[in-house]
Image: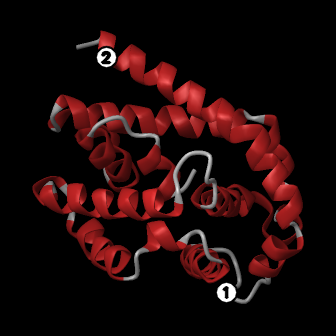
Amino acid sequence: MNYLAHSFLSFSDGQIVGQFLEDFIRNKERFSFPKEIQDGITMHRAIDTFTDSHPAIHEAKKAFSPLVRLYAGAFVDVAMDYFLANDLSLHSEKGWKDHSLKVYKVLNENSQFLPENFKRMLVKMEHDDWLYNYREDLGIKFSIQNVLNKAKYLEKDIPVFQAFLDNKETLQKCYDDFFPNLLAHAKAENALLQLDR
């Protein structure tokens, strides 16, 4: 899953920090953080493992795999944030805005734990309000281009955004089949983390 999902599936401020940190640290560094941040790192990994094995995600990858092959999962992650950001059963539009503002606030308040490359990204994320703007086609277009720009073995002009638009109805169904299962899994994982205190 992408940034919005990882932030939404956090059950404390520390978990928000850990969920964002996971992609920016080496495994051995995780134990240097406070317990709640470590829990966020653990939660991030549990979410990714569950996501990678879910049948609806395998189906969603078919929208992108003809264009990007093994990178399809990265674009599915971005696409799922679009549908999550538009899921009014979980938050109102204002609720998603409030969520985004809270995440930026929590990350800035915990800047002592953030590596410099993440801090630089956070400035852009907050300035352009990435989390809230995943609800817009243009927000997803920007994110898809970001993935293309970072991908070592992909051309930068592959029409992945057009594939997203062309397959939006199918991807929505995949989200509908998938996200309630992921939410239940994250809640169960969090309950186990609380037992481990």
Residue 172 x %, y %: 79, 55
Residue 24 x %, y %: 34, 56
Residue 96 x %, y %: 46, 59
Residue 28 image-quadrant placement: top left
Q: Is residue 132 left or right of residue 56?
A: left
Residue 63 image-quadrant placement: bottom right
Kindly report which numbered mark, 2 or 1, lies closer to the viewer in this rendering: 2
**Amino acid marked by disc 1:** Lys
Q: Does residue 30 appear anywhere in the picture?
A: no
Residue corresponding to mark 2:
194
- Element under disc 1: loop
**Amino acid marked by disc 2:** Gln
Residue 95 x %, y %: 44, 56
Up-down relation of residue 188 to residue 159 (above or below): above
Residue 103 image-quadrant placement: bottom left
- Which residue sits at x=72%, y=34%? 53
**Crowd around label 1: few <14 · some 14–19 · many ≥20 (10 Å):** some
- Which residue sits at x=62%, y=76%? 136
Give 152 or 87, whichever is nearer the viewer.
Answer: 87
> Looking at the rendered structure, which numbered label has been put on residue 156?
1
Give 57 or 10, whichever is nearer the viewer.
Answer: 10
Up-down relation of residue 106 to residue 108 (above or below): above
